[in-house]
Structures are given as structure tokens and as C-alpha cells.
Amino acid sequence: MAQNGVITILGCVKQGVEKGCLILVTGDGKEYSLHGKSLPTLGKGLGVSVRGTSGGVDTCMQGTPFQVESWEWTKQKCPK
């Protein structure tokens, strides 16, 4: 549910093509380039729920830019 443009997205985090880029892939295959001070780490094999705003431009050149306000692990299984 969006509130003041803030949305929550569920998915799996992977390393982006560009160095230093984290990409969240949703269950329907959409990709979001994650940005923010506190970002999920890789290699846990679990999904994440991220809350923030989407849009804008970035240097990752992969997926929709997404400014993360907060995130947490979920029980969703992801490829390692």
C-alpha cells in the first residue's frame, strides 16, 4: 500500500551487473536497483521486504531505482 509515495516490495537481492549495485528481483521478475544507507546483504538465501520510494535515475543501469528507507528479512527462499 502506498502512503506518500512510499511502497513495500518483496523479493530476492542479487549483485547487479555494475560494481556496487544491489538488485531486488520480485516474484514476477521486476527488478529494482536498491539505494540507501542501510541495505540488505547478499548470500543469506532468504528474501527481503524493502520499504521506500521508486523512481529517478542511477548509475546501475538495471531495474527501477529504489530508495530504501527500511528493510527486513522474510522467510521467502531465494537462489544462492
Image: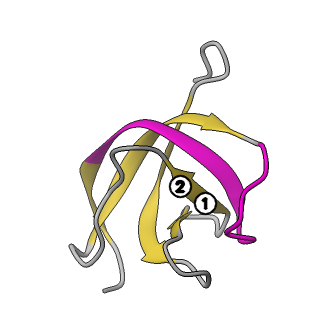
Q: CA distance from mark 2 to mark 1?
A: 4 Å
Rendering coords of residue 14 (x, y %): 45, 76
Say whether marks 2 and 1 touch (CB < 8 Å). Answer: yes
Residue underneath mark 2: 34
| Region rendered in magenta | 56-72
Q: Amino acid at mark 1?
A: Ser
Q: Is residue 10 above or below residue 79?
A: above
| Residue density around tag 2, few if under 14, some if 14–19, many if 20 or more, within 10 Å | many
Secondary structure under badge 2? strand
Secondary structure under badge 1? strand
Residue underneath mark 1: 33
Q: Amino acid at mark 2?
A: Leu
- Residue at left offset 42%, top offset 66%: 12
Quadrant of the image containing the N terminus: top right
Q: Quadrant of residue 6?
A: top right
Q: How many marks?
A: 2
Instruction: Please check the rendered image and state whether residue 58 is part of the magenta-colored stretch, yes or no.
Output: yes
- Residue at left offset 53%, top offset 70%: 21
Residue closer to the observer: 19 or 55: 19
- Residue at left offset 61%, top offset 46%: 66
Rendering coords of residue 23 (x, y %): 54, 67
Rendering coords of residue 5 (x, y %): 67, 22
Q: Is residue 39 above or below residue 46?
A: above
Q: Quadrant of residue 58?
A: bottom right
